[in-house]
Amino acid sequence: MREWSDTLKLGKGSGFIKRDLRLFPVSDAEFEADFWFDAESSTKRREVWMGMVIEREFGAVLAMNDVDWPPPTVNDLANLLGDAMSRPLTGGDRQRPRIVHLRNRPQWQELLPHLEQLGIKVVLADDLPWFDEAVVEFMQLVGQVVRRGRCWTKRRSGRC
C-alpha cells in the first residue's frame, strides 16, 4: 500500500524527474491538468479520483491516472504531468508544454517553482474549459460502454 504524503517528492521513484524532463524540447503546447471525483467507480470503502492532462489545441488526452487515496496530492499532480510529458497517450513526441493551466488550489503550490524551473509557465484559474469538456466526454463514453455490457472498470473493482 502506498504511503500518503502531501509533501512533494521529486526524482528517483517519482514520475516527475526534472533531470529527464529537461531533455525534452519546449513546445508551443498548452496543457490543462486536474482531478475529479469519480462517483461511478467509487464505493463506500474506496473513493476514486481521476486525473487527466489535456492538450488545449486539439483537446487530446495526454495522460490519465486514477487515485484511490483521496484527496489527490501534489505528488499525484506531478506524476500526472510527468506522464503527459514523457509518455503521452497520443504516442506523440515527448515535450514540455509552454504553459500549464491548473485550478487555483493551495495543494499545487509546491510544484509551481519546479515547473517554472523547467521553463513551463503556470496559469492558475478557477475554470478549465478543455478539461471540463473532456471529463464530460469521458463520462459519456464510459456510460456507453457500461450500457453495452462491457464495463471498463470490472477488472479493477469487480463491479460495473
Image (cartoon, rainbow, N blue to C red):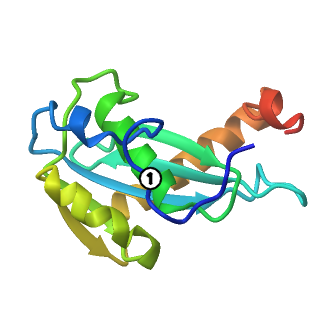
| Crowd rating for badge 1 (residues with CA inside 10 Å; few <14, some 14–19, many 20+) | some
Identify the image quadrant of the C terminus. top right
Q: Quadrant of residue 80?
A: top left
- Closer to the camera, 103 or 81? 81
Farthest residue toward the top? 91
Asked whether, in this view, residue 95 is left or right of residue 7, the answer is left
Residue 61 in view (yes/no)? no
Asked whether, in this view, residue 116 is left or right of residue 102, the answer is left
In the picture of the structure, the residue carrying the numbered disc 1 is: 9
Counting every numbered tag in the picture gives 1
> Horizontal and vertical percent for residue 84?
35, 38
In the image, residue 150 sits, relative to residue 123, either above or below, namely above
Identify the image quadrant of the N terminus. top right
Kindly identify the residue that appears in the image at 22 percent across and 69 percent down. Answer: 123
Q: Secondary structure at mark 1?
A: loop
Q: Quadrant of residue 109?
A: bottom left
> Horizontal and vertical percent for residue 91?
33, 21
In the image, residue 8 sits, relative to residue 52, either above or below, namely below
- Closer to the camera, 119 or 64? 119
- Closer to the camera, 98 or 159? 98
Kindly identify the residue that appears in the image at 41 percent across and 36 percent down. Answer: 12
> Horizontal and vertical percent for residue 24?
16, 31
Asked whether, in this view, residue 125 is left or right of residue 8, the answer is left
- Closer to the camera, 102 or 56? 102
Residue type at mark 1: give it: Lys
Kindly identify the residue that appears in the image at 32 percent across and 44 percent down. Answer: 59
> Horizontal and vertical percent for residue 11?
37, 41
